[in-house]
């Protein structure tokens, strides 16, 4: 099929299947999936600028479907999502400005690659450690519960002591989030969303790989709610990214629309599947995703080729 | 108990396959109908009015998302006798 905006020939079935796979991952983990969809578009011969811009447009559509489904399942904290918008947009703009500054300095590719590898590896290592410890602790608790000495919580975390300490920081104004069952300072929410936005603007995509773990570990949001709320936030950050890329001529919306037909159904399946897994198991299954992103960047850096 | 679960899983899988087939037919019709009709207009917009193109691009992807979400949810409900999951 010929796509006249980017002047490219791409098999629509390939686009639908790629969209479907990224949709399932996005619905289940609350990520945009740019680390898979971007290289997949590039592999079909699309220029890198079109791959990034078009992927963002497709992420907006997929995240709307997945977030709507999560909302129906009660997994979106709308109040938290709306407050986070402030930091997300500010961070995304600063990230984009940093990229422009690095472009002028002439070392953008190397610095972005090193930062992304460090970020992906740290997130994976931390989440592996935390979810493994939580699951081990939960198993021990279950054994003790059977002997009648303890009870287990619905969504435990081995990092909970740090989260609790952050929640006890009384920096005015304090925000009560009844859906998540959390009361926390407005400024901590803005800081978390700002960092997510910064990564989104700096490394591209929706930055769900950093925002979803931050929601769980820093704000103390239950994993299912973090996945749904992160998807809501991705709509904002990827929507903003789509607009700025589109006015630079980097978006082939026809490709995004075709990809999204697969993503729409994949996102629904992924979102429904979260209901069958406990929070720590979702977090443990999340671990390979940033590693895939890191592997792609390392390959690009070492070979000098873009995938 | 296990037999009931297996029966339920088989029913869900069958409904999902039927949904995929119906969805595939709808999407194929969509490719040839909407995209071929929209293509030339969007190219013209992209070359002549890039800002309007950016707004239209976001509106199109949002519109398609809402539409497809409604279709897939409707199909799921229809195939599972009024239940969405």
Image: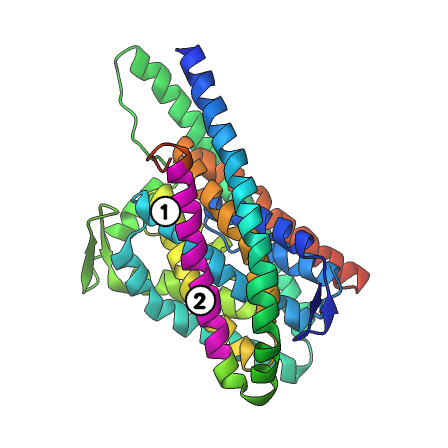
- Badge 1, how many Cα within 10 Å: few under 14, some, many 20+? many
Q: Which mark is residue A27?
A: none
> Which badge, 2 or 1, is on the more N-terminal residue?
1
Q: Is residue B69 magenta?
A: yes
Q: Which mark is residue A70?
A: 1
Q: Nearer the viewer, mark 2 or mark 1?
A: 1
> Magenta stretch mostly in which secondary structure?
helix
User: Image height check: is A90 above or below A268?
Assistant: below
Please determine whether, in this image, residue A129 is positioned above or below residue A177: above
Q: Residue at x 68, y 76 (%)?
A: A107
Which residue in the protein does label 2 denote? A237
- Same chain shared by disc 2 and disc 1: yes
Q: Which chain is indicated by disc 2?
A: A
Give the image quarter of residue A191: bottom left
Which stretch is magenta?
Answer: B54-78
Q: Taking the image as drawn, is residue B44 in sight? A: yes
């Amino acid at each position: 099929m010929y796509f006249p905006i980017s002047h490219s020939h791409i098999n629509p079935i390939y686009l639908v299947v790629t969209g479907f796979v990224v949709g399932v991952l996005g619905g289940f983990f609350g990520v945009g999936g740019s680390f898979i969809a971007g290289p997949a578009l590039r592999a079909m011969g699309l220029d890198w600028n079109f791959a990034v811009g078009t992927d963002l447009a497709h992420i907006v559509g997929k995240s709307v479907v997945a977030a709507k489904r999560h909302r129906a399942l009660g997994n979106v904290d709308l109040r938290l999502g709306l407050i986070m918008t402030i930091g997300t947009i500010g961070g995304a703009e600063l990230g984009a400005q940093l990229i422009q500054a690095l472009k002028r300095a002439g070392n953008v590719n190397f610095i972005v690659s090193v930062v992304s590898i460090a970020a992906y590896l740290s997130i994976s290592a931390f989440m592996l450690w935390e979810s493994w410890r939580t699951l081990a602790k939960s198993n021990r608790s279950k054994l003790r519960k059977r002997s009648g000495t303890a009870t287990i919580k619905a969504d435990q975390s081995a990092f909970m002591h740090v989260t609790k300490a952050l929640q006890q920081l009384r920096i005015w104004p304090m925000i009560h989030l009844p859906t998540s069952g959390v009361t926390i300072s407005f400024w901590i929410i803005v800081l978390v969303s700002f960092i997510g936005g910064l990564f989104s603007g700096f490394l591209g995509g929706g930055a769900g790989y950093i925002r979803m773990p931050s929601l769980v570990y820093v704000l103390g949001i239950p994993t299912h709610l973090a996945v749904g709320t992160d998807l809501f936030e991705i709509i904002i950050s990827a929507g903003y990214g789509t607009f700025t890329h589109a006015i630079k001529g980097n978006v082939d919306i026809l490709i995004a629309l075709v990809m999204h037909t697969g993503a729409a159904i994949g996102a629904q399946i992924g979102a429904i599947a979260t209901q069958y897994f406990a929070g720590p198991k979702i977090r443990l299954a999340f671990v390979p995703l940033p590693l895939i992103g890191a592997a792609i960047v390392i390959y690009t850096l070492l070979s000098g080729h873009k995938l | 108990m296990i037999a009931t679960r297996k029966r339920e899983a088989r029913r869900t899988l069958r409904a999902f396959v039927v949904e995929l087939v119906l969805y595939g037919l709808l999407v194929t019709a969509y490719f040839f109908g909407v995209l071929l009709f929209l293509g030339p207009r969007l190219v013209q917009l992209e070359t002549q009015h890039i800002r309007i193109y950016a707004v239209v691009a976001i509106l199109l992807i949002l519109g398609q998302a809402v539409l497809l979400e409604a279709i897939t949810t409707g199909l799921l409900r229809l195939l599972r006798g009024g239940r969405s999951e």
